[in-house]
Image (tube, helix red, strand yellow):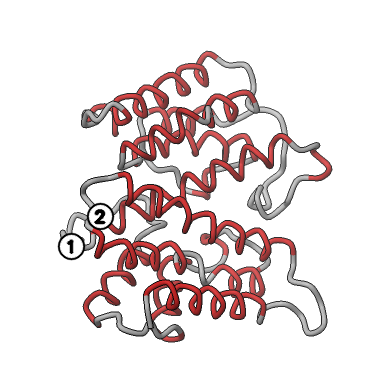
Amino acid sequence: MEESGVRQALELRFREYARSFAPPGEEPPRPNTLKLEHTFDVCALMDRIICGEPVFAPEQYFPAWLCALFHDVSRFEQYRDYRTFRDDKSFDHGKRSAEIFLRDFAVPGLPAEERRRVASAVEFHNKPKLPDSLAPEILPLARAVRDADKLSIMKLLNRHFKRPLFSREEAVNLGMPDTPGFTEELAAIALRGEPVKHSMMKNVNDFKITVFGWTSDVNFSVSARFLLEGNYYGELRSFLPESALLDELYEVSVGRLRILAEGREVPESCRS
C-alpha cells in the first residue's frame, strides 16, 4: 500500500478508536471532539514544520506524521476514566499514548526500529524537558512533535479565551477556576523559561502564564515564525491582568521567538 493509502487507513482507524469512547448511541463528549480536532491540526502543523526545515529528509516525513497522529491517543481513555486532561490527576498521557500506539496500531511497512523511534518521540512529547539520554536519531522527531503540539494549543487557547466566559470549555481550562489575579512566583519561573508544575497553578491566569514559558522550548524557526506572524502571544497577553511583570514576561518570550525565527540559536541564558 502506498504511503497516502496508509495515512488514510490510519486516520480512519484513529477516528474509530476515538469514537469507541463515546457512550453507546450518543455523540462523543465535547472534550473528545476537541482532542480529535487538535490531533489532526497537529498533523497538519507537523507537515508544515518538517517540510520547512532542511534538517528533515523526505523519508522522515511519514514517521513525523505518525508522531503527530498518536501523540495524544490516550486522551480519550484519560477523559473517560478521570474526566480531566490533567496528567497530575490521572496518568502520564505521553507514556500511555506510546503504549497504545505500540499495542493497538499496526503500521504496514514501518520497520520495527522506526516504530520504536516514533513511540519514543510520542512518550516524551509532554515532558517538561527532553532527557539528555535521548538517542540522537529520536531528537528531531521529538522536538518537532513538541513544537507542533504547542502551536496547535496556542491556536486553541486564543480561540477559547476570545469566547464569552459562560461558553468556554472546562476541559481547556484544565478544571481550574477563572478567577482574577495570578501567582507572581509562577510568572517568575516562566520568565526564566523554566517548566512549571501543574500543581503550582491556582487559576486559569496561571495556566496562561505557563504558556509563555513554552517559548524557551520552541525548537524550529518555522515554529517561531508561525507564532510571531499569528501574534499568538500578543493575544494571550491581552487576556491577562495589567502588570509590569507580565509585560516583561511577554517581551522576553517574544524576544526568544524572534531570535529563533531569524535562524539564530537562542542563547542558553534565554532558554533557562
Q: Quadrant of residue 63?
A: bottom left
- What is the crowding at mark 1: few (fewer than 14 residues within 10 Å), some, or many (at least 20)? few
- For badge 1, the amino acid type reads Glu
Name the residue that disc number 1 marks: 137
The one of 201 and 165 positioned closer to us in this rendering:
165
- For badge 2, the amino acid type reads Pro
Q: Are marks 1 and 2 in contact (CB under 8 Å)?
A: yes
x, y percent for residue 19: 67, 77
Query: Mark 1: which secondary structure?
Result: loop
Q: Quadrant of residue 3?
A: bottom left
**Which image quadrant: the N terminus?**
bottom left
Is 198 rendered above or below residue 3? above
Name the residue that disc number 2 marks: 140
x, y percent for residue 269: 24, 27
Of all residues, the one furthest to the top in this rendering is 244
Is 57 rendered above or below residue 23? above
Q: Quadrant of residue 80?
A: bottom right
The one of 104 and 123 positioned closer to us in this rendering:
104
Is 26 rendered above or below residue 189? below
| Residue under the image location 50 percent in, 68 percent down | 91
- Give the CA distance from mark 1 to mark 2: 7 Å
The one of 133 and 230 positioned closer to us in this rendering:
230
x, y percent for residue 142: 31, 57
Drawn side of residue 186 relative to residue 265, left or right: right
| Residue under the image location 32 percent in, 51 percent down | 50
